[in-house]
Image: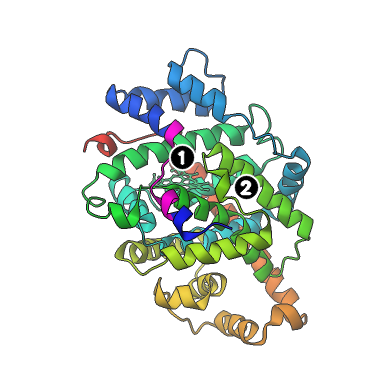
């Protein structure tokens, strides 16, 4: 189990292999070249022959799965995801992504800062779901898999943002408290948010997940974490151990901030846009509250209580722990959640198709400090 001293050290640590590749491009003033190279890689998933040596070496090394990666467990997790994709996607939108806005020691601030500059922090949700589809499609983490390439690209994007944000005026003066932007502790927290915290959310919506499936899902995310450059000492052994670790990260990092409130407001507008019709609009804060928990909703993210009938249903579930004893009411909720999740994913799909997926793009403004 990780302790505070170790986590403090991780807060001050970025991702040296990816950071040094990015520093090379920044020093040479070659960010447009990097954007073009990564765009080509994204488009055809080609082998990066002819790339500048440090980038080629990074792409070669970071594509290797760790020795402990277990193909059988990865396939099991991918099958679980394929079976319940829309529900998992919905939990990502209503829990795993917005809960990160509670991270007030630089986490929410870097998201808000980058989003304001690039005018697209709302679309990050869509891009993150796309990332998950890439890694969770069977074969996505195999040799030359789409998920591997996407994760390599995201890791470089994080390194570029790290370089920019640490020099940005908004970061100056906070280095002692916040550490490095997108540091190892933040990365580990996000890894849990996307894996075990998602599993908890799916269970709260009635999905029965076999213990071995849950462990396989978590294992697969640790493999993804490896490609993303997350220090393996930060990986909890098992799903139950992850719960203790998540608690420690919440205690250390969650707090109410302007950036977090801005992000959650924007996220709610984004969800309103995504969900077809208006009937569920008032249920959005309710489902967010239900999945993220009352304490974070009240004290950190200021999520309003809703009087919608759906709210009453969820309230009753919460009060009477109906997920354990109330199987009469539960099938209804599960059916409603499933229907909503499919609608949501369809709508997100349209948003991504009509929208503005970007292969790889570090705006020049990010490196101008
Ligand atoms: C498991 C860990 C993580 C995963 C899987 C992940 C995933 C992603 C993905 C898929 C993107 C690409 C979005 C796009 O193309 O527009 C992205 C961008 C980004 N990530 Fe992460 N991320 C992780 C951890 C973090 C952490 C810890 C932070 C810092 C708080 C962070 C901050 C950002 C920022 C600022 C961007 C750029 C967003 C923008 O362009 O506005 N990420 N991440």
Which of the pair 150/222 is nearer the observer? Answer: 222
Q: Is residue 294 left or right of residue 80?
A: left
The secondary structure making up most of the magenta span is helix
Going 37% across and 30% down the picture, which residue do you hit? Answer: 22
Q: Secondary structure at mark 2?
A: helix
28 to 83, vertically: above or below: above
- Please provide the residue range marked out in magenta: 8-17
161 to 58, vertically: above or below: below
Residue 239 belongs to magenta span: no
Q: Is residue 256 left or right of residue 85?
A: left
Q: What residue is disc 1 on?
A: 357
Which image quadrant is residue 366 in?
A: top left
Q: Which residue occupies the extreme top position in the image?
A: 50
Residue 198 appears in the rendering? yes
Is the CB–ligand 1 distance for label 2 below 8 Å? yes
Label 2 to label 1: alpha-carbon separation? 23 Å
Q: What residue is disc 2 on?
A: 221
């Amino acid at each position: 189990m990780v302790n505070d001293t170790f986590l403090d050290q991780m807060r001050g640590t970025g991702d040296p292999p990816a950071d040094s590749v990015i520093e090379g491009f920044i020093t040479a003033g070659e960010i447009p070249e990097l954007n073009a190279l990564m765009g080509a890689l994204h488009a055809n998933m080609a082998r990066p022959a002819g790339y500048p040596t440090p980038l080629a070496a990074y792409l070669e090394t970071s594509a290797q799965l760790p020795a402990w990666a277990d193909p059988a467990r990865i396939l099991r997790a991918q099958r679980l995801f394929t079976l319940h994709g829309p529900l998992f996607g919905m939990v990502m939108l209503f829990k795993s992504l917005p809960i990160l806005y509670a991270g007030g020691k630089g986490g929410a601030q870097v998201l808000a800062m980058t989003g304001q500059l690039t005018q697209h922090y709302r679309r990050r949700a869509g891009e993150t779901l796309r990332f998950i589809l890439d890694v969770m499609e069977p074969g996505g983490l195999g040799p030359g898999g789409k998920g591997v390439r996407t994760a390599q690209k995201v890791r470089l994007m994080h390194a570029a943002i790290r370089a920019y944000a640490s020099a940005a005026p908004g970061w100056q003066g906070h280095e002692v408290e916040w550490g490095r932007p997108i540091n190892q502790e933040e990365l580990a927290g996000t890894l849990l948010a996307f894996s075990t915290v998602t599993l908890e959310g799916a269970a709260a919506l009635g999905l029965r997940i076999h213990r071995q499936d849950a462990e396989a899902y978590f294992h697969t995310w640790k493999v993804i974490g490896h490609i993303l450059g997350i220090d393996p000492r930060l990986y909890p052994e098992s799903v139950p151990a992850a719960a203790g670790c998540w608690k420690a990260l919440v205690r250390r990092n969650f707090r109410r901030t302007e950036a977090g409130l801005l992000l959650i407001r924007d996220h709610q507008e984004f969800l309103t846009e995504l969900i077809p019709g208006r009937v569920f609009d008032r249920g959005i804060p309710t489902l967010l509250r239900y999945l993220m928990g009352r304490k974070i909703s009240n004290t950190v993210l200021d999520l309003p209580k809703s009087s919608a009938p759906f709210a009453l249903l969820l309230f009753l579930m919460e009060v009477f722990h109906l997920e354990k004893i109330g199987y009469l009411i539960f099938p209804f909720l599960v059916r409603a959640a499933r229907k909503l999740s499919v609608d949501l994913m369809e709508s997100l799909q349209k948003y991504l198709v009509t929208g503005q997926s970007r292969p790889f793009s570090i705006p020049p403004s990010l490196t101008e400090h």
